[in-house]
Image: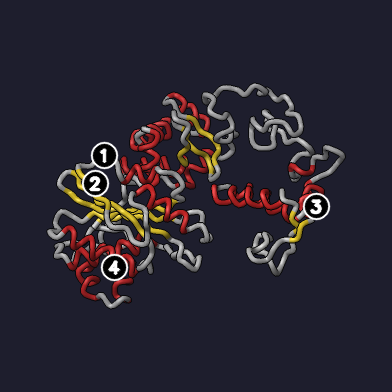
């Protein structure tokens, strides 16, 4: 049993389009649970709307499960997998929708769950990959597979199975040698696969180019030049140096070079070795050129001082194009520069706090964004335009709007 999963916001219709993509030989919409919309697009929108009260910005959980060819009862294996999966994560009763895909004589199933419970609590998905793998091993065993699917979590899965009282499945896994075999490594992670599909750049080709540039060079400047000859550039990312491909997508240099070496000869180049070679380089921040061709100078390049408060291009946020820090050098925040009557961040916060409660509420709703919050902000403005006097506390809702049956006092 092969499964995959990804959390998301579900705000666009991209997921619905993916589930209904016509490249499949057949797409069957399955019976949804707890939803009223007749189509996948509407059902996913319902899931998002139902999740607005949860404390998460990723309330949607999209999964797929694909039984192995050796399993004769495809539908039965899928049904058993979903039952065990819901029990494992406490998702029984949670709303979901989904589809079955039939392609090239194989049938697999997608489901989209809401992770927000009616109470507002969010489903715990910690270690979800290993936990889904445990479910898959149980189904494989129960459906007569001769060997379990290899997994790098085999030892942890065996321990969890024994703790759950499934010694039969644990013994089957140990007898197959899966707990002592070398850990398999996926060619691409789910995120890398999505990036490759979006950019059209083969990650294998990119890894090979980065490794060739690494082996051609002996120091950081040489590595940069070797990358440049291959249409790549080296920038500074949030977690260290990144290799930027022709589409402007950044790939962490330590991971890219290390993975390439491991696939080429089985020996990974340690991240520390990559960091040592690149230490001391002065690199542009990734994204500073706003899509300009790598290596081209900014309009203000050459050390011209940026005007305080002006656009922040160049060597980094809050610096001029030559890398100098405006308004007093290191250790000072943007608010340390005094303008407009020497009023700083503290003065701005004081002015915000001093605003009427209704004005602060409207600003908060608009900053939070989203259709629901925008509608609430419009409702607050509508009530305010009638010159009602709001009496916080009894007789108002949580927004301070007068409740029905309690007539507002006119100003």
Q: Position of residue 404 (x, y in %)?
A: 63, 63
Quadrant position of residue 296: top right
Q: Which residue is mark 4?
A: 84
From the image, state whether disc 3 or disc 2 is nearer to you. Answer: 2
- Which residue in the structure is indicated by mark 1? 22
Q: Is residue 113 shown above or below 24? A: below
In this orientation, does residue 155 appear?
Answer: no
* Badge 1 or badge 4: first in the primary sequence: 1
User: Which circle marks residue 350 in the picture?
Assistant: 3
Above or below, comparing residue 58 to residue 318 in the picture: below
| Nearest-to-viewer mark from 1 and 4 | 1
Q: Residues within 10 Å of mark 1 (few under 14, many from 20)?
A: few
Instruction: Give the residue at x 70% y 25%.
Output: 303
Q: Nearer the viewer, residue 90 or 31?
A: 31
Residue 263 appears in view: yes
Quadrant of residue 260 in the image?
top left
């Amino acid at each position: 049993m092969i499964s995959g999963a990804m959390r998301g916001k579900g705000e666009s219709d991209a997921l619905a389009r993916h589930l209904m993509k016509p490249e499949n030989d057949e797409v069957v919409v399955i019976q949804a649970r707890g939803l009223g919309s007749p189509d996948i697009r509407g059902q996913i929108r319902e899931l998002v709307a139902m999740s607005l009260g949860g404390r998460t910005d990723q309330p949607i959980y999209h999964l797929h499960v694909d039984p192995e060819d050796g399993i004769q009862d495809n539908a039965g294996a899928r049904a058993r997998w979903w039952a065990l999966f819901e029990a494992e994560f406490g998702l029984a009763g949670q709303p979901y929708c989904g589809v079955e895909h039939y392609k090239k004589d194989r049938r697999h199933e997608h489901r989209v769950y809401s992770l927000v419970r009616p109470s507002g609590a969010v489903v715990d998905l910690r270690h979800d990959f290993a936990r889904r793998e445990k479910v898959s091993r149980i189904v494989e065993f129960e459906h007569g597979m001769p060997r379990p699917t290899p997994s790098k979590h085999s030892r942890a899965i065996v321990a969890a199975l024994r703790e759950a009282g499934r010694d039969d499945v644990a013994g089957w896994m140990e007898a197959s040698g899966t707990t002592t075999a070398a850990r398999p490594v996926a060619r691409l992670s789910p995120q890398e696969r999505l990036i490759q599909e979006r950019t059209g750049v083969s990650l294998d080709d990119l890894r090979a180019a980065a490794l060739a540039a690494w082996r051609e060079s002996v120091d950081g400047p040489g590595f940069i030049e070797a990358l440049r000859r291959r249409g790549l550039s080296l920038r500074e990312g949030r977690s260290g140096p990144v290799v930027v491909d022709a589409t402007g997508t950044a790939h962490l240099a330590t991971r890219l070079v290390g993975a390439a070496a491991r696939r080429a000869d089985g020996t990974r180049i340690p991240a520390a070795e990559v960091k040592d070679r690149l230490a001391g380089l002065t690199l542009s921040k990734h994204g500073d050129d706003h899509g300009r061709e790598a290596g081209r100078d900014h309009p203000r390049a050459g050390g011209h001082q940026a005007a305080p408060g002006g656009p922040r291009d160049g060597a980094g946020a809050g610096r001029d194009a030559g890398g100098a820090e405006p308004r007093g050098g290191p250790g000072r925040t943007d608010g340390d520069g005094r303008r407009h009557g020497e009023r700083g961040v503290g003065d701005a916060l004081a002015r915000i706090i001093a605003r009427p409660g209704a004005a602060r509420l409207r600003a908060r709703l608009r900053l939070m964004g989203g259709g629901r919050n925008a509608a609430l902000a419009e409702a607050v403005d509508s009530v305010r335009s009638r010159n009602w006097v709001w009496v916080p506390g009894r007789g108002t809702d949580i927004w301070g709007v007068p409740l029905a049956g309690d007539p507002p006092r006119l100003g």
